[in-house]
Amino acid sequence: QAQLVESGGGLVQAGGSLGLSCAASERIFSINAMSWYRQAPGKQREFIARITSGGSIDYADSVKGRFTISRNNAKSTVYLQMNSLNPEDTAVYYCNVVTQTTPVRSYWGQGTQVTVSS
């Protein structure tokens, strides 16, 4: 059974918008940070955005002002709203959840493809 289930990827034209969501299963508890990463073909996975349980948010410079991360703690779900997309945003997007248990546990989603056409 998947621990993190992502949804919302797809194909969009440059300048368009897409929203991603990632829901954590009930088996993951004491969630601290919820993050999004992406990996383009031939490139390393890179950090996109993070939101902590306390509400602190960080973004990669490449997406600041265009992407918005949010979370619903009651649903253990993290969202990523992506606006003003460009072809360089094309990648597989992964969500990551880190717990505040001892030991800390990290979970990854299966990835969802986002393709931006020019």
Image (cartoon, helix red, strand yellow):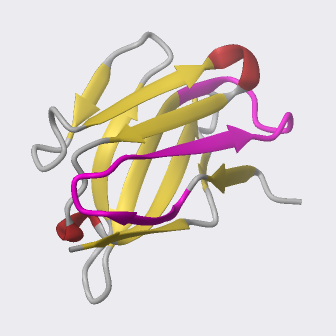
The x, y position of residue 72, in whole percent, is 62, 19
Q: Which quadrant of the figure has residue 86?
A: bottom left
Quadrant (top left/top right/bottom left/bottom right) for the N terminus: bottom right
Position of residue 74 in the picture relative to residue 90 (left or right):
right
Q: What segment is highlighted magenta in the picture?
A: 9-32
Locate residue 25: give its quadrant. Answer: top right
* Count of numbered circles in the view: 0
In the depicted structure, whether residue 18 falls above or below residue 92: above
Residue 4: x %, y % from top left:
70, 50
Q: Which of these two is toward me, 62 or 58? A: 62
Q: Quadrant of the C terminus?
A: bottom left
Rendered location of residue 30, percent (x, y): 68, 23
Q: Is residue 61 above or below residue 86?
A: above
Residue situated in front as seen by the camera: 36 or 112: 112
Q: Position of residue 101 (x, y in %)?
A: 65, 29
Q: Residue at left 36%, top 71%?
A: 91
Q: Is residue 31 magenta?
A: yes
Compared with 11, 71 (above or below) is: above
Q: Is residue 59 left or right of residue 13?
A: left
Which residue is farthest bottom? 42
Q: Residue furthest right?
A: 1
Which residue shows up at 33% across the image and 16% down it? 56
Residue at x-position 73% and y-position 15%: 74
Furthest-top residue in view?
Answer: 54
In the image, what residue occupies the spot 45% across and 61% down?
Answer: 93
Question: Does the magenta run of residues contain 25?
Answer: yes
Query: In this view, which residue lies farthest toward the left?
Result: 61
Q: Is residue 99 left or right of residue 48?
A: right
For residue 55, side relative to residue 86 (left or right) = right
